[in-house]
Every structure is written in C-alpha cells, then in structure tokens.
Image (cartoon, coloured by chain):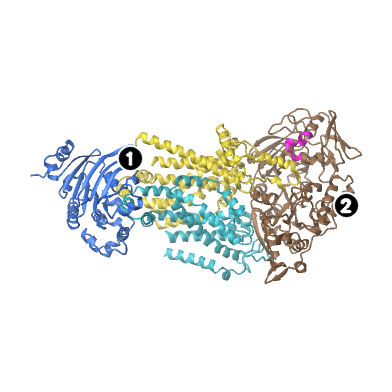
C-alpha cells in the first residue's frame, strides 16, 4: 500500500535555499509532528508541499507523492484539483487566513463547490469541529468570529473533502491553552474517525507530541532527527533536539 | 431616508430620459428662428439658444444620451482595469500615451455618413476602452496587497478555481475602490465627450449632449445673459451626489 | 531584504523603466505618424502659395524615413543633448521645454499637492469623524467640482485673479476623494489600527505610522494618478489663460503634428509616471 | 505666499507701461520673424509692423505711396519698375541700406531653395524678374513679360539685412527688441527710420483666449482688438459704445462646395448629383442666407452675392445680387431633374435618398451653428445632411489630399484686394482648386472658360480689360456654383478712444495699416 504522503524537496527564495532536500514519509492514518524553531522553514515546507510557494516568491525542486501520485510536474489546474481534495490544509492564523468580509456560509459553500457538485450540507461537518450549525452562525462574517471559532472553521475547511493527508501549519499557536487542548483533541478524534494522515507543523513540541505517532525535528532546513515522541523526549540524539527538549517547560512535580 | 430620496431622484431623472419625447415640449432640433436667445419663461422654460432651439428640450434629450452612455463607458473602463491591472508596465505606458491621436485615427476610419447617434455611441465605447489605465493604476496597489494576504493562500490551498477566488474573495476588497473609480469616470467621460468634439468624435449637430451643453459655460457672457445655461451643470451635480449616496 | 537583493531589484526596475520610456516614445511617434493630417500643413489651403513652395514646405516638415529609422535617429539625437527642432514652432525642443517647464511643473506640483491634501482632508472628515453633516459637505463639494469642467474653473479663477494652482487642485481632488475615502475606510476598520489605538498611541503616531505607513503603496499610486490628472487639467487651464507652459505646448504640438516635440513630451511624461510607479514598488 | 506667484504670468507685466506704448493681443507665438518666410497671421502682424518696404499701398485711397523709395517709375511696356531710394537709409542695427540690399532681398525670395511664399507673388508663368542695381540708390526690376500691378507687389516685400539672425534687424518703423515666447513681444521704434512714428513702442501680448483678451480690453489694458466675434462685439457695443467699430463687410466669404473629384468615398450616384449644376443651384437656393447672417452672426454679416466680397469695391461685380431664399423653387427645380419627395425624403431618379455629409472644422462655433442652419434648411426639402466636424489636420488632409468627403463648409480669407491671389483656387490645375484639386484638364466648358479668364487676369496689362474678364468670371461662378457662397461677415473691431489717428479698413492689417500715424492720448 502506498504511503499517504512521501516527499523529498528542496526549496529556495531566489538564490537562498531554505530547505535542503528535506524528506519525509507519512503512512495512512499516521500523525507526524514536524518541530523546529521559527524561521527553520516550517511554513515554507507546508506551502511547498501544496505547491503554492511560488505565490510567496519561492521555488521548489524534488518530488512529492500523495497516495503514490506524483505532484511535481502537474499543471496548475491539475494541482487545483489536488489541493483541498487530496491534501487538506489548516493554516496558521484565522485572523489573516479568513477573508473577513465574507460570510461563513459563503466560505463553506465555496470550499465545498471547489471539489463537489450540488449544495453541500455542513451540519455534520460543523458539529465534528464543535461549531454551531445554525443560521445565525452561518450568516456571521468571518471577521466577527472568535479566534477559536475561526480555527475550528479552518479545520472544517481542511477536512471537508476527506483528504488523504492534512497539513496543519501551527494550527494552535493563536489559541489559549484550553482551546489549544480542545483543538488538539479534535485533530486526534478526526484522525481516529476518518483515518486521515496528518502532518503537524509546530514549534510547540510538547503540545503536538501528545497526539503524534512520530516527531521529525527540522533545523536549518534539514531534518536532523526523527523518531517516536517517547524516544525524542527521553533520548534526544542531535544537539539541537537536546536543546529543544531541555527548553520545554516541565510539570512541577 | 437620504438614500431613498437619492434613488427617487435618480429614478426620476432616468424616467425623464426614457420619456424624453413626452416631457420635452419641442424637438431638440426645432429651430424657432424668430426667437433666438430668448429669455427663460413663457413659451421656453429655460430660454433658447442662438438658433432658437428650446434649451429645456435639449437638456431633456441630452440627459437621455449622456445618462446611459457615460455610466456604461465608465463600467467598461473599470471592468477592463480589473482585468488588466496586473500588467503594471502596460498600465504605466497607457497612462502616458497621447491618446488623442488614437481618437483622430478612429475618426479617420469611421465613414463620414455615420449618424450622430452611432458616432456618439462609438465615442463613448472608445472612451470606455481607452480609459482603463487610470483605475487600473489605482487597483494595482491594492491587488498587490491582496496577493500577499493569508486568506488568498488559504483559498488556493482549498483548491478553489481562480475565477471563483477573484469573484468571491477578491472583489469585496476592491468594490469600494471600483465604485469610487466608477463615480469619477462618469462625469469625466461626460466632460471629455465635449473635448472629443474638437476632433470630430463628439456628438454632432443637431444632437445635444451634456458635454456640449456644459461647454457653453466657457463663455461667461452667455451665462450672465441666461443663467439657465447653468442648468445642465446643476443637474449633473445632483445626479452625481445621488449616485454617491446610493452606491455608498 | 538584503542590500544585495535590493540592488538587484533596483537594477531590474531601472532597466524596465528605460524600456517602458522608450516604448512610450515609440508608441507616441507611431500614433502621430499614422494619424490623418500628419502630412498636411495649413498652407495646403493657402492659394497664394505656389505648388513648388508647397512641396518645399512639405519636404522641410516631413521626415520621410520609415518610423523606426526616424525614432532611432531621434533617440541618438536625444543623447547628444537636444530633442530636435520643433516643426510647428520652429524652435529647438530642448529650449522650448526648458523655458516652459518651470511654470507647468509648479502649477502641476502645487495642484497635485493641493488636490491630495484637499482630497485627504475631506476623506478623513467623511470617514474618521463619522459626522453626518461633514460627510454631506464632503460629498456635495466633491460632486460639485467633479462636474465643473476644468476650463470653466480656470476662467473663474483667472477673472478673479486667484491662484490657478487652486483651480488645478479643485479639478484634481474630487477624482481622488472616493479612492482616498475607500482607502481610509479600510484602514479605519483594520485590526492593526485598532490594536494601535488600544495601546494608547497618539493620533499623530497612528496617522504617520499606521495610516501613511500601511497605505504608502496605494498613496504613491494615487499620487502618480494625481500627477497625470493635474497635468491633464493643466492643459485646458494653460490654454485658456494663456500661460506659456508645457500643457499649452502639448496641445499646440498635437494640433501641429509636431513629431519631435510630441516624442519629447511622451518620453518625459512616461518617464515621470514610470518613475513614480517604480518608486512605489521599491519602497514597499 | 508661494501661491501668489502663480497668478497668471501675463498679469505681472500689466502694471508696467510706458507713456506711448501701444498694447494689443496676438493669438499665438509668431512662427517666424523672417519676413520672407511668414505664413501665419501672427508672424504677418510682426512682419508688417517691422517691415521696411519700398512703397506702401494706402489702404483707404488705394494709392501707392513712397516709403524707403522716394519715387518709382514704371516702364511703358509694363515689364519693369525703377525705384529711387531715399539717401542714408539704415537698418535698426545701424548698418546702411542701399539698392544692393533690395536686390539681395528679391533674389533671396526668388531662390527656389528658400521656398519663400513672398517669392511666389513675384513669380509668373513667363519667368522670374531680374534685379539690376543701377547705383547705390537706384534699382530696376525687369520681368520678361508685362506684369499687372507690378508696383503693388513691393508693399509686402520687407528688405532684409545681410546677417540672417533668428530675429533680424529691421528696416521699418519698429524692430523686435524683446521676445518672451508664449508671453509677449516688444517692438521698439527704429531710431534710424526715415520718419518718426508717434508711438515709442508696441507690446503684443500673446493671448490665445478671446474672452480674456476682451476682458483685458474692457479693463483698459489693451488698446484694440482687431477681430471680434459678433457676440463679443455686441458686448463691447453695450459696455463701451465708443469703442465698437464695425468696419463693414470683410473680404472673407463663408462658403460650401461639393466634392466633384473622383473619390472612393463618394458613391457614383452622389457624384452625379454633385456634378449637376441644377442640383447645386437648388441647394444654394434652399439655404436661408439671411437667417445665417441674422442668427449665426447676430446681423453682423450679409448674404454673399458671389466669389468676391462687396468690400472689394473695385473688383466686385455690382451686377450680382445675393440669391434669395426660395425653397419652393428649389423643390420644383429638383422635381424637374427627376428627384421625388416621398414621405419627407427626397429621392433621386434611381430611388437613392438624397443625403450627404458636410465636413467642417471643429471648434469654430459660428461655423457649427451655420452647419446646423443649413442642415435644418435642407431638411425642409427632404435632404438629410450629416454634419461632421473635424480637427484641422484631418480636414486639410481630406480636402487637399485624399478627397475623402462629400461636401465641405469653410471660409476663404482674402489678404489682398487683388483677385489674382486666388488663382490657384480657380484654375483647374490649381493645388487649391477646391472641388477637384490638381484636375488634369477642365471637365466642362464653363470650367475651361474660367481657366481662360483667370489666365488673362494674370497677364493682361489693361486694367479695364482685366476687370471685364473678372466680371465675366464672377458671373460664371454664380451661374455654375461650383462653390456656393453664403455670407460675407462684417469685420468687427474694438478700438479704445485713447488710440488716435486710426483709419481702420476691412482688409488686413485692418487697424494697423497706418501704424506710423497711430498715437496715444
């Protein structure tokens, strides 16, 4: 059986390479956390995997396969049918990623009709991300949502078409601790229910480690260490991983 | 309330234009040769011009022409600007070309027996097409900002077709500027039509237009002799303010 | 951005600026060359002139070279300092421009500045104060000056011996008002501005950092358009009031099919518009 | 206040004025200060005021009077003229002027390389004149064949200095002492001129806007306006009655003609109408000339009788009368030609509706109004006229080069009384032969006759015979109407009562012709 996602890519902005032949494999149903400091190229990786990096002025070389299907070399219109359908994406901050002028309903409908015919029904979807499905909510403008609601909505967009793999780029960084925990729990549930493979990109090792099956450490554009969370925490090998683990807050016990 | 009043006025003006033959007491080209430069009042509501044509009737018919064509041309320009604004070099180039020669060339290609109405239709069409660079230059900066936005990336990541993205996501952000540009272009085109008359592309005798009625204002003596010459200016201003109120 | 990256971007921008300016000049030359009347002179209708003299006059006025050759020679001449000799005014173009530029530059610069200031003030009044009365005033004023032909404005100012730069400003500001208001309205609601207010920043800081800073790209675009608009309204104003400036010159050149003069004007105007555009790009 | 510096530059110098400085407006910059290359009106004004000419035609008495030449003598055979110059003549820069300067001026004007329009007036079909300097103060100019009105030609020949500068020194009463392009030209009295004019200097303010010129005149900043439009004239008459001067009919005529040249833009059936004298006459008869004069020109114009304005008293054929308006007669004449009026639309024998386009130049309000009157008049007999106003360059190209038009409304401006000036319009082979430029041979008998009459006008030494030929020519034009003459406008001027010594005439340069006698009080 094919892996949900397999990639080996390099990415650069102009002449500066920011990802140096970063490779990864995610099996179906697996949750992989990718941790690294700000500026280590995490967001670049997410955009590179979606082949959206050129919109931010970057370029990608290498190979990306989703369920055995090679993405590099696909035309823009072919890529369009991949994005949101094969690869879901949950962006960083609902403040900027939601078009504040549009209604929730419009956003949902548009995301739906990108890959499906007819009118979608969003009750179950919204329920699964613990958002109300009533008219009042649907008629709200994106700018009027709270950050937690916004993030849940973005997750709903990400999983709407039951993608093979979900890329989540710092999905919890804008949230308070309690909401953060709830959203993480939501991801875990969705993973169990739908079997969606997930790539979690985060600087917050501790929070994502709790739900992931494997952790990759990204440092200066390279993956320096990879392994199950337990091993990473107990026996980090790479000096960078060690410093990362050491810097984590410990429970006061 | 104000909005309703403004819409009512606009509808009234539009109705006047639509039913011009019923409202105008005379034909716009009827020459009362015995009463040139007649004062306002009596038989002629706003007096007559140098050939004894009823100013009021001319204004009503002029409204009919200008009020339809100028907004249509402005809409064409704004639409073109939205489509072409990403070509910023082209925009700059078009902003600085001596367009007047394009119009002179167009006039040369046009047969001489083109009727006054066809000629003015073409004039406005040309203005609409040629006038895209101004709004495009304004859109250009906003569009560049939008391109950087997170929501655009999100929309792309969810696989929406770009046409839908433009329509659903981008347009709401450009709407205010587009409407502002539209409102500026309408009177600009109405006025330019008079100057295009100087190269033979404006409205031809005997057809009246707001452009050639407004051009009369350039003769201060004429205005002091018959203040009703100011009427088109007042009406146009009223329409512009109402348009502003309605589209705000 | 790194200094090197900036230098590279600057260089590529400058190259494209030169290309656009040259294209602008060429397009202008082509338009003039292929418009009717290029090969006719007012003297064609003068019965007192003999056919031989007429032929000689035509030979003097027309450059029979194909357009690309004409343009290449013209550009070569430009690098040697002059823009050629105006065919309609019979004077060196460079001298004409030098003598006439100051008046127009001043009129356009003051008109643009005045127009931007007036437009921004009214837009600010309409958006910021949220005062219905002020909004009505702003909208009515804009409506009024939007529909008055610049030529009429010029006459009113001329007869009252008022500064004509104000006439230019009055012709320009209503065309900017709507855009400025839309821009300010956007900013007014932006979260960044809200946050800035929440931090208790002074209005001056908000105005300079958040409004001017955030909108600098659009503001420069608007300034570019304002300059073109101001020049556009300076033409009838100069013509009507008999001011010997570039605007009146441009009209004369167009009527007289004055190829060297028109090319020079096209080059200069394209240069200014493109330069502003490039500047706007670079500072973003 | 930075802004205040911007108050129109032309207002700056209004305050500075010397005692005897004549001030008036010029509509634009002169294109040249070289007297031999003057083509435009503005250059001509400057040329006239600075011209050192051998003789001058008195515009009132029509007599030739001495200027730089104290006397002249025509040879009995009418081929040569001998001028005797005044002694001690000088240019404005102090260099002496003698007969060799006259010869050089004439030869320069005649040099084909110079393409001088002044030279054209001296050329004849038989050849060019030869100048012979007899002594420093005497010169003889000899033609190979008799040349009518030879002495009058020298009214327009300004003697030029050796040094060809951009602004040359002058041999006339004034010289250009200051030129501010786009603003003003100052002429100062030539200290070496043989006579002392009453004016010290003249300032010509370049003022393209007629309304502003009028306002400045009414404020007393300008001493006269040479040509006013009827509306402005009525305003002067109301506000300063003493200043309003109607100089009577001008030499100019407003007219229209049909394109008779073979042209791709004129369909064959229309070409048939346009070449038909009956059709042209019917059109002429259905145009209400009185209404044009009354409405368009506020009564300051008169229906034209023929190709020559009655202002040209000597050459005008007094037998001719303006064609009265008679739409009924026109309709009848058209009916007898096979035209039929059905449902308000006139159709020709083959059923083509009678309609044509009328081009004229844009931006000339009276002319556009005139076109509207004609359109309305012809509508009454079922003819649809499509008015197209064109910008000057395009208009000239159509009428002088491509023949892409059907009918044209324009005016002829005459600078001179002498009717041979318009020869190029009437000769079939003429470049300005309006209805068919550069026609190879005359197409009809009457055209051949016009050619013959014109040729004899140019060479016949007897004035009486020339007048006879010219009368016949006028009669022929009125009968055949290749050009339909509409009205002669009055020449309307405004002259400040402070300007004395004026003897304005309708022919150019109307007020300025006797600039030597003008004075200010």
Q: Nearer the viewer, residue D277 or C68?
A: C68
Q: Is residue B100 left or right of residue D430?
A: left
The answer to whether residue D98 is visible is: no
Which mark is on residue D468? 2
Around disc 2, counting alpha carbons within 10 Å, would you say few (fewer than 14), some (14 to 19), or many (20 or more)?
some
Around disc 1, counting alpha carbons within 10 Å, would you say few (fewer than 14), some (14 to 19), or many (20 or more)?
some
Q: Nearer the viewer, residue B90 or D313?
A: B90
Which mark is on residue A13? 1
Quadrant of residue A45 within the rendered picture? top left
Q: Residue furthest left?
A: A253
Please identify which colour was used for chain C in the image. yellow
Please identify which colour was used for chain B in the image. cyan
Which mark is on residue D18? none
- Magenta span of residues: D106-118
Circle 2 chain: D
Chain appearing in brown on the rendered image: D
Chain appearing in blue on the rendered image: A
Percent position of residue B98, x then y: 55, 46
Q: Nearer the viewer, mark 2 or mark 1?
A: 1
Residue A104, magenta (yes or no): no
């Amino acid at each position: 059986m094919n892996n949900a996602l397999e990639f080996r890519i390099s990415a650069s902005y102009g002449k500066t390479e920011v990802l140096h032949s970063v490779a990864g494999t995610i099996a179906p149903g697996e949750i992989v956390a990718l941790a690294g400091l700000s500026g280590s190229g995490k967001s670049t990786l997410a955009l590179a995997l979606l082949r959206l990096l050129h919109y931010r002025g970057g370029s990608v070389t290498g190979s990306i396969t989703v369920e055995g299907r090679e993405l590099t070399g696909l035309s823009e219109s072919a890529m369009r049918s991949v994005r949101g359908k094969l690869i879901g994406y949950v962006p960083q901050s609902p403040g900027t990623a939601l078009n504040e002028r549009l209604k929730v309903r419009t956003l949902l409908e548009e995301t739906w009709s990108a890959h499906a015919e007819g009118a979608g029904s969003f009750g179950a979807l919204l329920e699964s991300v613990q958002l109300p499905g009533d008219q009042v909510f649907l008629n709200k403008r994106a700018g009027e949502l709270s950050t937690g609601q916004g993030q849940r909505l973005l997750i709903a967009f990400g999983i709407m078409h039951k993608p093979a793999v979900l890329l989540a780029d710092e999905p919890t960084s804008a949230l308070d601790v309690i909401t953060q925990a709830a959203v993480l729990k939501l991801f875990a549930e969705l993973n169990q229910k739908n079997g969606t493979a997930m790539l979690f990109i985060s600087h917050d090792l501790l929070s994502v480690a709790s739900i992931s099956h494997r952790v990759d450490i990204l440092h200066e554009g390279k993956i320096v260490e990879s392994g199950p969370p337990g091993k990473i925490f107990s026996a980090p090998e790479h000096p960078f991983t060690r410093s990362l683990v050491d810097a984590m807050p410990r429970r006061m016990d | 309330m104000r909005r309703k009043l403004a819409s009512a006025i606009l509808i009234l003006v539009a109705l006047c234009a639509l039913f011009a033959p019923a409202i105008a007491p005379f034909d716009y080209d009827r020459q009362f040769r015995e009463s040139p430069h007649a004062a306002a009042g009596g038989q002629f509501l706003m007096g007559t011009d140098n050939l004894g044509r009823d100013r009021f009737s001319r204004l009503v018919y002029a409204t009919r022409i200008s009020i339809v064509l100028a907004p249509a041309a402005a809409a064409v320009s704004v639409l073109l600007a939205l489509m072409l604004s990403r070509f910023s070099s082209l925009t700059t180039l078009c902003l600085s070309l001596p367009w007047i020669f394009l119009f002179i060339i167009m006039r040369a290609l046009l047969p001489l027996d083109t009727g006054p109405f066809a000629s003015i239709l073409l004039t406005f069409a040309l203005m609409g097409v040629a006038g895209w660079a101004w709004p495009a230059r304004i859109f250009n900066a906003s569009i560049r900002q939008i391109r950087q936005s997170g929501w655009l990336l999100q929309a792309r990541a969810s696989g929406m077709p770009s046409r839908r993205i433009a329509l659903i996501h981008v347009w709401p952000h450009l709407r205010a500027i587009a409407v502002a540009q539209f409102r500026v272009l309408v009177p600009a085109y109405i006025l330019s039509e008079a100057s295009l008359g100087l190269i033979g592309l404006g409205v031809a005798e005997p057809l009246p237009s707001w452009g050639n009625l407004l051009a009369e204002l350039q003769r201060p003596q004429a205005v002091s002799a018959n203040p009703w010459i100011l009427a088109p200016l007042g009406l146009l201003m009223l329409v512009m303010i109402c348009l502003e109120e309605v589209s705000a | 951005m790194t200094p090197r990256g900036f230098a590279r971007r600057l260089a590529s921008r400058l190259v494209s600026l030169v290309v656009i300016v040259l294209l602008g000049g060429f397009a202008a030359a082509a338009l003039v060359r292929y418009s009717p009347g290029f090969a006719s002179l007012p003297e064609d209708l003068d019965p007192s002139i003999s056919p031989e003299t007429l032929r000689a006059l035509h030979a003097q006025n027309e450059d029979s070279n194909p357009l690309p050759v004409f343009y290449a020679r013209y550009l070569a001449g430009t690098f040697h300092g002059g823009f050629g000799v105006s065919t309609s005014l019979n004077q060196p173009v460079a001298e004409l421009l030098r003598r006439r530029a100051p008046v127009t530059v001043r009129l356009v610069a003051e008109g643009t500045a005045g127009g931007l200031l007036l437009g921004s003030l009214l837009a600010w009044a309409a958006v910021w104060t949220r005062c219905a009365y002020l909004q009505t005033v702003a909208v009515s004023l804009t409506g009024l000056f939007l529909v008055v032909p610049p030529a009429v404005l010029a006459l009113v100012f001329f007869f009252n011996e008022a500064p004509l730069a104000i006439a230019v400003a009055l012709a320009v500001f209503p065309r900017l008002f709507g855009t400025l208001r839309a821009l300010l309205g956007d900013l007014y609601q932006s979260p960044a501005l809200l946050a800035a207010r929440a931090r208790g920043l002074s209005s001056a800081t908000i105005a300079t950092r958040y409004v001017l800073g955030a909108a600098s790209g659009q503001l420069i675009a608007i300034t570019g358009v304002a300059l073109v608009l101001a020049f556009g309204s300076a033409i009838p104003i100069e013509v009507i009031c008999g001011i010997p400036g570039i605007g009146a010159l441009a009209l004369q050149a167009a009527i007289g099919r004055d190829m060297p003069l028109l090319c020079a004007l096209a080059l200069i105007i394209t240069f200014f518009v493109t330069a502003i555009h490039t500047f706007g790009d670079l500072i973003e | 206040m930075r802004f205040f510096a911007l108050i129109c530059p032309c207002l700056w110098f209004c305050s500075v004025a010397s005692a005897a400085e004549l001030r008036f407006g010029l509509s634009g910059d002169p294109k040249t200060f070289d007297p031999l290359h003057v083509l435009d009106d503005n250059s001509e004004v400057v040329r006239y005021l600075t011209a050192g000419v051998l003789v001058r035609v008195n515009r009132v008495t029509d007599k030739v009077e001495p200027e730089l030449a104290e006397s002249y003598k025509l040879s009995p055979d009418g081929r040569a003229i001998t001028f005797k110059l005044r002694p001690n003549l000088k240019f404005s820069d102090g260099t002496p002027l003698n007969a060799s300067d006259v010869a050089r001026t004439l030869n320069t004007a005649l040099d084909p390389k110079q393409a001088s329009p002044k030279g054209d007036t001296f050329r004849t079909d038989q050849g060019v004149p030869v100048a012979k300097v007899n002594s420093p103060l005497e010169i003889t100019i000899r033609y190979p064949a008799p040349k009518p009105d030879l002495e009058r030609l020298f009214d327009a020949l300004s003697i030029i200095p050796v040094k060809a500068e951009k602004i040359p020194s002058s041999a006339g009463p004034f010289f250009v002492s200051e030129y501010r392009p786009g603003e003003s030209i100052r002429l100062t009295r030539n200290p070496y001129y043989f006579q002392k004019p009453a004016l010290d200097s003249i300032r010509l303010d370049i003022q393209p806007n007629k309304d502003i010129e009028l306002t400045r005149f009414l404020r007393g900043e300008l001493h006269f306006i040479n040509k006013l439009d009827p509306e402005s004239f009525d305003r002067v008459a109301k506000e300063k009655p003493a200043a309003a001067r109607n100089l009577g009919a001008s030499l100019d005529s407003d007219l229209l003609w049909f394109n008779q040249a073979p042209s791709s833009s004129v369909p064959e059936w229309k070409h048939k109408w346009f070449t038909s004298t009956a059709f042209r006459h019917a059109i002429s008869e259905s145009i209400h000339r009185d209404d044009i004069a009354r409405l368009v020109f506020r009564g300051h114009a008169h229906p034209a009788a023929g190709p020559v304005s009655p202002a040209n008293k000597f050459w005008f054929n007094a037998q001719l009368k303006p064609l009265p308006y008679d739409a009924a007669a026109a309709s009848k004449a058209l009916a007898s030609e096979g035209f039929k009026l059905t449902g308000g639309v006139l159709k020709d024998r083959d059923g083509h509706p009678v309609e044509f386009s009328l081009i004229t130049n844009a931006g000339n309000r009276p002319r556009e109004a005139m076109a509207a009157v004609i359109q309305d008049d012809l509508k009454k007999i079922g003819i649809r006229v499509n008015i197209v106003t064109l910008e000057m360059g395009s208009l000239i190209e159509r009428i002088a080069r491509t023949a892409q038009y059907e009918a044209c409304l324009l005016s002829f401006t005459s600078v001179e009384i002498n009717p041979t000036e318009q020869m190029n319009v009437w000769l079939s082979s003429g470049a300005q032969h309006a209805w068919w430029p550069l026609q190879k041979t005359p197409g009809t008998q009457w055209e051949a006759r016009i050619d013959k009459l014109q040729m004899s006008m140019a060479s016949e030494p007897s004035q009486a015979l020339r007048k006879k030929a010219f009368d016949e020519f006028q009669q022929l034009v009125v009968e055949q109407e290749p050009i339909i003459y509409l009205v002669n406008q009055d020449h309307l001027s405004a002259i400040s009562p402070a300007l004395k010594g004026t003897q304005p005439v309708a022919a150019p340069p109307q007020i300025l012709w006797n600039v030597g006698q003008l004075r200010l009080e």
